[in-house]
Amino acid sequence: MKILIKNKDINEALKKVSNLGFVPTMGSLHKGHEYLIKQSKKKCKQTLVSIFINPTQFNNKKDYLSYPKNLRKDLNILKKLKVNFVYIPNKKDIYSFKRKEAIVLKKENKVLCAKFRKGHFEGVIDVMDRLTNIIKPKKIFMGEKDYQQLLLVKKFIENKYETKIVSCKTVRNKNKLALSSRNQLLSKSDLIKAGKIARELFYFKMFLRNNKKTKNLLQKKIELLKKNFDIKIDYLEIRKKNNLKTSLNIKNSKIFIAYFIDNVRLIDNF
Ligand code: AMP
């Protein structure tokens, strides 16, 4: 496993690699990331994993500074998975040039997390553009856990590069809670609570399949979750899978949630 830090190391190491799979991460790796890496290893000849906590996608400095970091553990996991390359760039190298055209989200895309985290996706798209330009992978593996991110990045990258984005299912624990680096910031009791919320939404989706009055049911669900779990909900909405437009029917749609337990913001979709 080669560890690459500088851009010139990347250029040198990847000179003769043609079928490269890329898994971008912010580290604190878990089984969700591992699944993406396994998919890349299956579909590509070589795999590169990046670990970079991108400052520009955090709309809150405290959130950025408290983001979990476990580099030594991450490197052990990557070694065991027999990843070919790990790229751990520094901020200076990634942001060595100013972009010519600012990333601007269309009005229709300013929903869900784009509405609640100003500048977040602009930061994600910017860093994915820079990473793709440096690495030039054949495929990029991304999780459905961050569904809105997946759709926005796919549109931007596939429009600009030959690279294809491969979407990978969400990996959950036995309580149906989506694995996330942020789960490390939760107390044991909050982890259990988050698992109960995930289960409740999983069964709520099944219930919606036989029900037409989704608008009323959603509102009731929001009130119930707030009351039972003492959480602050940014949104609980049903939106179409392909374009994230609002939907009154669960068919071809998903339930999207973002909420805070204590001060930790979790997102999921079902
Ligand atoms: P992150 O390190 O949180 O920026 O995530 C890096 C990549 O892993 C993103 O494409 C995420 O969507 C994906 N990912 C995070 N959690 C999961 C999960 N539980 N299952 C599958 N993919 C995930």
Image (cartoon, rainbow, N blue to C red):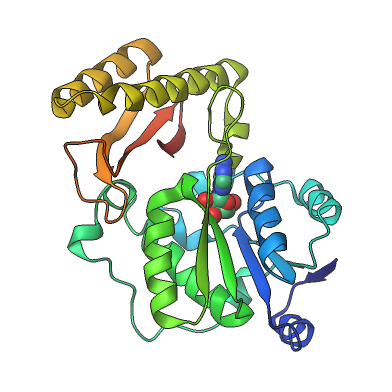
Residue 221 seen: yes
Dividing the image into 4 quarters, which one contains the C terminus? top left
Near-viewer residue (209 or 246): 209
Q: Residue at x 74, y 82 (%)?
A: 17
Q: Residue at x 32, y 49 (%)?
A: 241
In the rendered image, the vertical position of residue 34 relative to residue 9, given as above or below: above
Residue 87 seen: no
* Percent position of residue 110, x then y: 24, 56
Horizontal side of 108 relative to 22 (left or right) equals left
Q: Residue at x 42, y 65 (%)?
A: 153
Total labels drawn: 0
* Percent position of residue 4, x then y: 77, 73
In the rendered image, the vertical position of residue 202 relative to residue 255, given as above or below: above
Horizontal side of 108 relative to 157 (left or right) equals left
Q: Residue at x 40, y 15 (%)?
A: 229
Residue 253 image-quadrant placement? top left
Near-viewer residue (64 or 15): 15
Residue lying furthest front: 210
* Percent position of residue 228, x then y: 36, 11
Near-viewer residue (235 or 81): 81
Dividing the image into 4 quarters, which one contains the N terminus? bottom right
Near-viewer residue (156 or 38): 38
Horizontal side of 113 relative to 10 (left or right) equals left
Residue 123 image-quadrant placement? bottom left
In the rendered image, the vertical position of residue 240 relative to residue 92, given as above or below: above
Residue lying furthest top: 228
